[in-house]
Image (tube, rainbow, N blue to C red):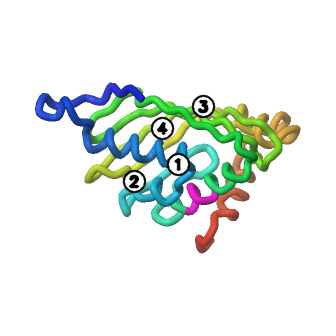
Amino acid sequence: MSSILEHSEASAAEPSTCEATLHRFYTAFQSLDAAAMAACYHPNASFSDPVFKDLRGEKIAAMWLMLTQGAMRSRGDWSLEYSILSGNERKAMVQWDARYSFAGRRKVHNRVTSHLAFWDGLIVRQIDEFDFWRWSRQALGPSGWVLGWNKQYQAAVSAAAIRRLPGVAK
């Protein structure tokens, strides 16, 4: 993948630590390797997106484990492409597109923009943005079409997803 992360002259030939972390993370994501993805996070990391709001610590690893296991069951139609849009040693913005079957039935194309911050070369904060209503229409079918725009429905979907996180005390 091409990158436009800023480099110093001394490191122009080598990717920055944060750029290397991004490539390690998204390559692991493409391979559905949740353990390798979790290893890219700082112990004090936080994660948030429209479904998983304000996850911290072990809940981030549990989320990626749950999502990668679901993608593995999606009958081999998983794919992920990513582009590093901008960044430096402290922050980056990445756009990624995932294609998969939700619950093995419904085809989903989710376009996500990730805003990441780094500490000690690891992800310390990740905020993912995507259109929940667009995603819910694809993933959840008729209920997503009708209610995906509704904040109460979004909160219910989020709460149900949090309850399904493996191995995490709720």
Q: Quadrant of residue 65?
A: bottom right
> Mark number for residue 114?
4
Separation of residues labelled 4 and 2 (CA atoms): 15 Å
| N-term-proximal mark, 3 vs 2 | 2
In percent of width and height, residue 64 lies at: 56, 55
Circle 4 residues within 10 Å: few <14, some 14–19, many ≥20: many
> Mark number for residue 48?
1
Separation of residues labelled 4 and 1 (CA atoms): 10 Å
Q: Give the structural element (helix, strand or loop) at label 2.
A: loop
Q: Amino acid at mark 3?
A: Arg
Tags 4 and 2 touching, CB below 8 Å: no
Q: Amino acid at mark 2?
A: Cys
Circle 2 residues within 10 Å: few <14, some 14–19, many ≥20: many
Q: Which residues are magenta?
A: 62-66
Separation of residues labelled 4 and 3 (CA atoms): 10 Å
The residue drawn where x is 40% and y is 46% is 24
Q: Nearer the viewer, mark 3 or mark 2?
A: 2
Q: Is residue 116 above or below residue 9?
A: below
